[in-house]
Image (cartoon, rainbow, N blue to C red):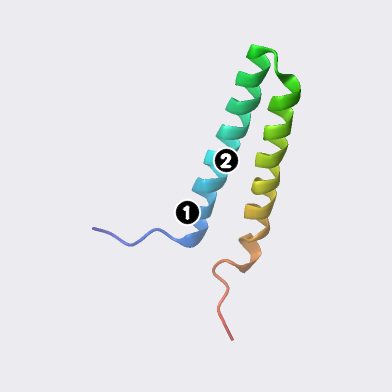
């Protein structure tokens, strides 16, 4: 086994999965004709993306 993954790398993985979910949710809802619902769910996922990315400046910062 190697080094454990860094917190920054894990956060980028979570952000990538959230972005993929955002695109998939909006596309699937649009294909069914539910644009409003797709945009509503997409907006919530986009908000989570913003929150996750806002944490980046504090990850890896040393205490002291």
Quadrant location of the C terminus in the rendered image? bottom right
Q: Quadrant of residue 39?
A: top right
- CA–CA distance between discs 1 and 2? 12 Å
Depth order, front residue of 56/28: 28
Q: Report the disc number at residue 10.
A: 1
The image shows residue 15 at horizontal and vertical percentages of: 57, 46
Depth order, front residue of 49/7: 49
2 horizontally vs 59: left or right:
left
Residue at 65% from the left image edge and 64% from the top image edge:
57
Above or below, comparing residue 30 to residue 10 in the picture:
above
61 horizontally vs 42: left or right:
left
The image shows residue 63 at horizontal and vertical percentages of: 57, 82
Circle 1: element type: helix
The image shows residue 20 at horizontal and vertical percentages of: 56, 33
Tell me whether circle 1 and circle 2 mark residues in contact (CB < 8 Å): no
Q: Report the disc number at residue 23.
A: none
Above or below, comparing residue 62 to residue 32 in the picture:
below
Identify the residue at the far left of this view: 1
Residue at 54% from the left image edge and 69% from the top image edge:
60
Circle 2: element type: helix
Dot 1 alpha-carbon crowd within 10 angstroms: few under 14, some 14 to 19, many 20 or more: few
The residue where tag 2 is placed is 18
Identify the residue at the far right of this view: 36
């Amino acid at each position: 086994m190697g080094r454990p993954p860094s917190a920054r790398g894990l956060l980028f993985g979570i952000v990538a999965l959230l972005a993929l979910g955002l695109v998939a949710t909006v596309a699937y809802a649009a294909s069914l004709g539910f644009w409003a619902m797709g945009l509503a769910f997409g907006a919530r996922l986009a908000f989570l993306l913003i929150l996750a990315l806002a944490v980046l400046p504090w990850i890896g910062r040393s205490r002291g």
